[in-house]
């Protein structure tokens, strides 16, 4: 049996859940419910698409993204773990950790009583991961696909030493235009601008974009709403287990330096990322046997 046949035999649900080769021959799972369709790549356990019935995709994917083993996919929901951003001491280590660069294993697929589909994938330490981060862990990514999208990243310390990590659900939202959208939910929150060290406070109720934006809001647990008049929708982004929210759009100039994005790519996405942590603040500490879950619930609405 091929890998695809094995996965379909073990986890497929007729007419609802199918495994197939996707772009670059990376294996993905396609989900179809009464309320939405979605695709999740086993590479990085990365959600590539989530389209509620009758709507545009909620999730943005770069037309120039690579789809290659060991390379980051540009778009969707990259899972950043066990560090977010550059490695705190060794810049040669991969940005945003190794979780998005490895193949995850499918653990469970099931249908709930509400006819939502749940897909769970796991990542365990490997020679590669131990060389980059010498700790024993078990990570599970769980996706609940229905009229809302829920994504959970759960990490357990399976080793004998306490470890610290940071993580993020680096969600690329598909928007009509960066010039007209606004984000609600971060008024009075404090943030680091770019990679700066000075803490600033957001005074306005709504965040608009007219230039490159890379804000790391600390100590915030609040829900954000993306107001998108062009697509006539509001996307609610709630979170748990997260004290940092990152908002990123690279703007015109920085986009020119990003090889896997079209020059105008920045116009149609915004990243709103439930995360822990920035510059060593709000790191997650797990003693042996302890577990932490970072989760988001994304609700499309009018
Ligand atoms: O979340 C924002 C950010 O950390 C930016 O600084 C930017 O570099 C972005 O992530 C994308 O990172 P990547 O490694 O995927 O190019």
Image (cartoon, grey):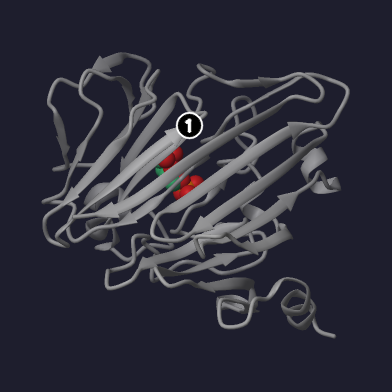
Residue 115, horizontal then vertical, whole percent: 51, 65
Identified at 77% across, 79% down, the residue is: 9
**Which of the 4 quarters of the picture holds residue 28?**
bottom right
Residue 299, horizontal then vertical, whole percent: 34, 50
Identified at 56% across, 65% down, the residue is: 40
- Position of 212 with respect to 11 (left or right) is left
- Position of 128 with respect to 234 (left or right) is right
**Which of the 4 quarters of the picture holds residue 37?**
bottom left
- 166 or 70: nearer the viewer: 166
Quadrant of image for the C terminus: bottom left
Q: Is residue 164 above or below residue 209?
A: above
- Position of 13 with respect to 60 (left or right) is right
Q: Is residue 86 above or below residue 149?
A: above
Identified at 38% across, 38% down, the residue is: 238
Residue 45, horizontal then vertical, whole percent: 61, 57
Quadrant of image for the N terminus: bottom right
Where on the image, by quarter, is ligand 1? top left
Most extreme residue toward the front is: 113
Q: Secondary structure at mark 1?
A: strand
Label 1, on which residue? 240
Q: Is residue 11 above or below residue 238?
A: below
Residue 135, horizontal then vertical, whole percent: 80, 31
- 198 or 144: nearer the viewer: 144
Identified at 39% across, 68% down, the residue is: 35
**Which of the 4 quarters of the picture holds residue 269?**
bottom left
- 126 or 154: nearer the viewer: 154
């Amino acid at each position: 049996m091929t890998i695809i046949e094995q996965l379909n035999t073990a986890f497929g649900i007729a007419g609802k859940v199918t495994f197939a080769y996707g772009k670059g021959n990376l294996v993905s799972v396609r989900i179809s419910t009464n309320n939405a369709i979605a695709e999740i790549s086993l590479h990085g356990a990365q959600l590539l698409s989530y389209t509620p019935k009758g709507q545009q995709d909620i999730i943005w994917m770069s037309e120039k993204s690579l789809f290659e083993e060991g390379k980051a996919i540009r778009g969707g929901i990259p899972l950043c773990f066990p560090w977010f951003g550059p490695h705190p001491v060794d810049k040669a280590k991969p940005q945003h950790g190794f979780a998005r660069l490895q193949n995850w294993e499918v653990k469970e697929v099931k249908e709930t009583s509400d006819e939502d589909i749940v897909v769970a994938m796991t990542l365990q330490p490997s020679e590669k991961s131990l060389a980059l981060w010498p700790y024993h862990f078990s990570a599970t990514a769980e996706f609940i696909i229905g009229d809302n999208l829920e994504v959970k990243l759960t990490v357990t310390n399976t080793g004998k030493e306490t470890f610290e990590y940071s993580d993020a659900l680096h969600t690329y939202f598909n928007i009509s235009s960066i010039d007209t959208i606004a984000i609600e939910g971060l008024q009075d929150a404090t943030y680091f601008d770019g990679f700066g060290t000075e803490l600033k406070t957001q005074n306005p109720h709504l965040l608009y974009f007219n230039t490159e934006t890379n804000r790391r809001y600390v100590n915030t647990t609040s829900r954000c709403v993306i107001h998108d008049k062009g697509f006539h929708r509001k996307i609610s982004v709630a979170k748990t287990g997260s004290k940092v929210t990152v908002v990123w759009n690279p703007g015109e100039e920085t986009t020119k330096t990003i090889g896997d994005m079209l020059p105008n790519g920045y116009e149609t996405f915004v990243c709103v990322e439930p995360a822990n942590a920035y510059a060593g603040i709000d790191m997650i500490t797990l003693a042996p046997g302890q577990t932490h879950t970072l989760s988001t619930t994304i609700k499309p609405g009018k």
